């Protein structure tokens, strides 16, 4: 019996999504441990300073501890995942578009189209060149657009809201921070919750998986 063809490019995309899911699980499993260790170390330091009656130094160390726990750890542990997640989405869409483009026999690539951002570029290309629309509901599209903007804020401005050049993006981020989305700003720096990362991964995973399932019969034909 002849086995169905295997497309290793699609398998590679699925493997990347699997790896990201494992990474997220490990990341969120370690953050509470790191915070707990930080608290224990700081408690010992503060107890020692309290016994020595050094009030000014006690307050300085306490403030450092609060900043590390509430800002530094979530900021620098979770922000890179946002960058990786968007990169995985963008590269997967490009890879799938190239596979479909080869089957269609067109020289025009996704990057040849003009658009304000990658999401608009991809939707135009899939719909008008490949005739194979990217099917995403409004909730998924909104989250992908959010992910794109946040990725740019991290990659280009290190997550510092005031350093974001695009005024519209700054306003959107401030508006998101006022809602229960798992996005907040502390001292002007972007902070993400575990909830936000999990929900964002779920939408990226479902969007790419659905696209692969529809593209696979055409790619392997």
Image (tube, rainbow, N blue to C red):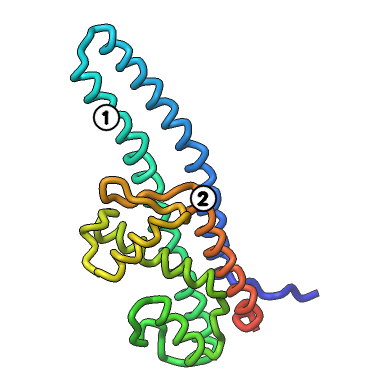
Q: Which residue is mark 1?
A: 63
Q: Please tell me how crowded label 1 is: few (under 14), some (14-19), or many (20+) other residues with Cα within 10 Å.
A: few
- Residue in front for this viewpoint, 73 or 111: 73
Kindly tell me whether residue 19 is visible in this rendering: no
Secondary structure at numbered mark 2: helix
Is residue 192 positioned above or below 87 on the image?
above
Residue 141, percent from left and from top: 49, 72
Q: Is residue 23 left or right of residue 48?
A: right
Please give the name of the residue rendered at 62% of the width and 83% of the height, measured from the top-left corner: 218
- Residue in front for this viewpoint, 15 or 28: 28
Please give the name of the residue rendered at 54% of the width and 80% of the height, measured from the top-left corner: 134
Kindly tell me whether residue 56 is visible in this rendering: yes
Indicate which label's residue lies in the foreground, 2 or 1.
1
Q: Which residue is mark 2?
A: 195
Quarter occupied by the C terminus: bottom right
Quarter occupied by the N terminus: bottom right
Please give the name of the residue rendered at 51% of the width and 42% of the height, measured from the top-left corner: 26
Kindly report the distance in space between the C-alpha atoms of the residues bearing marks 2 and 1: 26 Å
Q: Residue furthest front?
A: 178
Secondary structure at numbered mark 1: helix
């Amino acid at each position: 019996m002849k086995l169905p063809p295997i497309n290793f490019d699609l398998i590679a995309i699925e493997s990347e999504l699997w790896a990201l899911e494992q990474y997220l699980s490990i990341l969120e499993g370690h953050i509470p441990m790191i915070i707990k260790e930080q608290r224990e170390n700081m408690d010992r330091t503060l107890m020692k300073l309290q016994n020595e009656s050094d009030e000014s130094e006690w307050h300085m160390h306490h403030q450092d501890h609060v900043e590390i726990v509430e800002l530094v750890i979530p900021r620098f542990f979770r922000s890179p995942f946002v960058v990786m997640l968007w990169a995985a989405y963008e590269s997967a869409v490009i890879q799938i578009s190239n596979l479909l483009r080869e089957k269609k026999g067109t020289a025009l690539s996704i990057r040849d189209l003009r658009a304000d951002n990658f999401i608009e570029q991809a939707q135009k290309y899939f719909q008008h060149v490949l005739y194979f629309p990217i099917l995403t509901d409004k909730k998924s599209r909104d989250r992908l657009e959010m992910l794109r903007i946040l990725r740019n804020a991290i990659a280009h401005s290190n997550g510092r809201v005031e350093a974001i050049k695009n005024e519209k993006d700054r306003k959107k981020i401030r508006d998101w921070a006022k809602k229960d989305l798992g996005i907040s700003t502390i001292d002007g720096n972007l902070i993400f919750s575990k909830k936000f990362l999990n929900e964002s991964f779920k939408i990226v995973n479902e969007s790419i998986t659905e696209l692969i399932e529809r593209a696979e019969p055409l790619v392997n034909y």
